[in-house]
Amino acid sequence: MPKVYAQASVSLDGFIAGPNGTGFDRLFAWCTAGDVETPTSQPDRLTYRTNAATAAYLRDLLEGTGALVVGRRLFDATNGWNGSHPLGKPVFVVTHEPPTDWVDTDTPYTFVTDGVTAAIAQAQSAAGSLDVGVGPGTTVVQALDAGLLDELRLDLVPTTLGSGTAMLEGLTKSHTFADPQIINGTGVTHLIYKLP
């Protein structure tokens, strides 16, 4: 059965970005810390190089995901991944106001103005029998608080950032997860938490 999951690289002190958008070199160093290649739909642009355990984890995500839901801040920070998301999947952007100058691109982008619940519903429709990935950032918090997530995947990186953007900042409810599935990578520990 398809699921809705959130996934992010996270520092030991819980940040997905350091002060002023720094720290990504450390948070994503694991993506090139091995010799097993896992290409995305755009291998010239993004091919992971990891150990075998992480490669299997990534293949599950890449092959099992049919659509993505992201927030406007991430969309703007990446300039819409320059018009083509490396996973090659439809992207649903949660925003109060769609950009007025956006031009259709290789990746189907849909700007959803009526909240994360509507965005996830549209993404599920587009994904069909595949999973929907959410976030990271406040979009994950909104989905978690709304009870829309089935799984939380943290790529825990052995570094601290001290401050920045916290993974789950702004939660308004408490949540209990099952014990995690643990996958040991090189420079990362993948933790898969299911929600009961």
Image (cartoon, grey):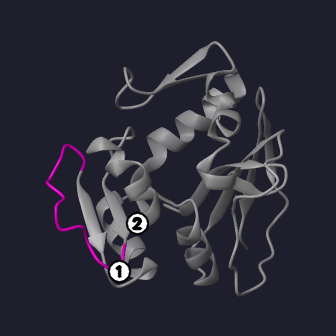
| Residue count near mark 1 (Cα–Cα under 10 Å), binned few <14, some 14–19, many ≥20 | few
Residue at horizontal 68 percent and vertical 17 percent from the top: 34
Say if residue 71 shows up in the picture. no
Q: What is the magenta range?
A: 95-107
Q: In this view, does 183 lie above or below 66?
A: above
- The location of residue 109, given as percent across then percent down, is 26, 58
Residue at horizontal 64 percent and vertical 12 percent from the top: 35
Q: Is residue 42 magenta?
A: no
- The location of residue 118, given as percent across then percent down, is 37, 80
Residue at horizontal 45 percent and vertical 40 percent from the top: 63
| Residue count near mark 2 (Cα–Cα under 10 Å), binned few <14, some 14–19, many ≥20 | many
- The location of residue 29, given as percent across then percent down, is 67, 29
- The location of residue 106, given as percent across then percent down, is 19, 43
Q: Main secondary structure of the magenta part?
A: loop
Indicate left or right for 70 with 60 as reference: left
Say if residue 155 shows up in the picture. yes
Instruction: Compare residues 40 and 84 and report the one nearer the observer.
Output: 84
**Residue 147 tag number:** none
Q: What element carries label 1?
A: loop
- Tell me whether circle 1 and circle 2 mark residues in contact (CB < 8 Å): yes
Of label 1 and label 2, which has the lower sequence position?
A: 2
Q: Quadrant of residue 186?
A: top right
**Residue 72 tag number:** 2
Q: In this view, does 32 lie above or below 97?
A: above
**Residue 96 tag number:** 1
